[in-house]
Amino acid sequence: MRVSALEEYTVRHVLEYRGKPMLQHSVTENDTIEDTLALMNRYNIVSVPVFGSSSVSGSSDGAFVDILSVYDLRDYIVNSP
């Protein structure tokens, strides 16, 4: 596909081409950074959904919390005190 042709397409085209996503990998709020990075590396993925854990205050067990990307992890590792 030529770059000039990209202006004709939308994100909807990409979603239709990709098909329905399947949730194959996820993490919880209690998973370690090391384990999360290992999972992402093993399956060559750049983001994972995070689900709550009953041992974390303020979250309901199994509830969706957020999407965590490898870039979020990198920024935390580099910039954390």
Image: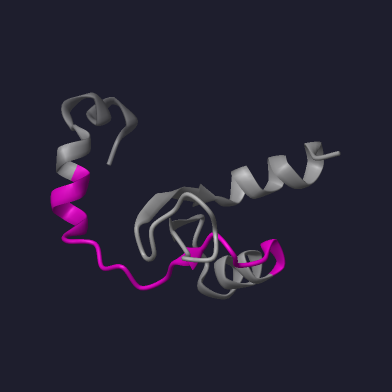
The colour mode here is one colour
Q: Which residue is depicted at the point 51% across and 73% down? A: 43
Q: Which residue is depicted at the point 53% across and 54% down? A: 57
Front residue of 64/56: it is 56
Tell whether position 32 is magenta.
yes
Does 71 sit left or right of 52 as displayed? right
Q: Which residues are magenta?
A: 14-34
Does 20 sit left or right of 4 as displayed? left
- Please state, as top left, top right, bottom left or bottom right, where the C terminus lies in the image: top right
Residue 21 location in percent, x, y? 24, 62
Q: Which residue is depicted at the point 17% across and 54% down? A: 17
Residue 73 location in percent, x, y? 65, 49
Residue 14 location in percent, x, y? 22, 45
Tell whether position 15 is magenta.
yes
* Quarter location, residue 2: top left
Residue 22 in the image: above or below residue 52: below
Front residue of 11/72: it is 72
Front residue of 58/25: it is 58
Front residue of 41/76: it is 76
- Please state, as top left, top right, bottom left or bottom right, where the N terminus lies in the image: top left
Q: Which residue is depicted at the point 35% across and 55% down? A: 64
* Quarter location, residue 9: top left
Residue 73 in the image: above or below residue 52: above
